Image (cartoon, helix red, strand yellow):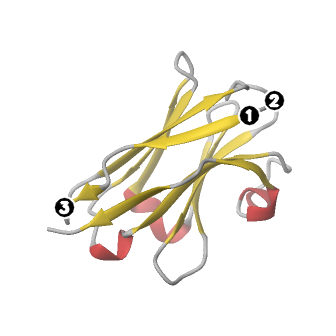
Amino acid sequence: QVQLHESGPGLVKPSQTLSLTCTVSGGSITTRYYYWGWIRQPPGKGLEWMGAITYSGSTYYRPSLKSRTSISRDTSKNQFTLQLSSVTPEDTAVYYCARGSGLLTIASMTTLDDYDYWGQGTQVTVSS
């Protein structure tokens, strides 16, 4: 059974960089042909795909967030991380990491139904 767990600070100040780590157990992040994504849900809004990293380390980002987002991985720890720079209160959300099992295409990676295992989510608040 694959399990994902998000960790990181729950409070970030405006203009700072938000950094979250997803620790995966029960499966390797390098296993073909999975991809590993970050999704968030602002209060009162729907889920928003932010980006993903594939089993081979390729990364893909939501165009509107691309200039502020970086996803990386540490295969020795079976972890992948999200960094979101220059945060504002609009970045306040519950952040989820998840495993994708669809095709290795942008269309599939941005389809939330193609993510089969999810972390429990972590609340991040941007406030001074």
Q: Answer left or right for 27 relative to 10.
A: right
Q: Earlier in the sequence, mark 3 or mark 1?
A: 1
* Alpha-carbon span between mark 2 and mark 3: 38 Å
**Residue occupied by mark 3:** 13
Q: Secondary structure at mark 2?
A: loop
Residue beneath disc 1: 2
Count the marks: 3
The residue to which callout 2 is attached is 32
- Proximity of marks 3 and 1: CB atoms separated by less than 8 Å: no
In the rendered structure, which amino acid carries the disc numbered 1? Answer: Val
With 40 as the anchor, is 52 left or right in this view?
right
Tell me the mark number nearer the camera, choosing from 2 and 3.
3
- Residue 83: image x %, image y %? 39, 48
The earlier-in-sequence mark between 1 and 2 is 1
Which numbered disc covers residue 48?
Answer: none
- Kind of residue at badge 3: Lys
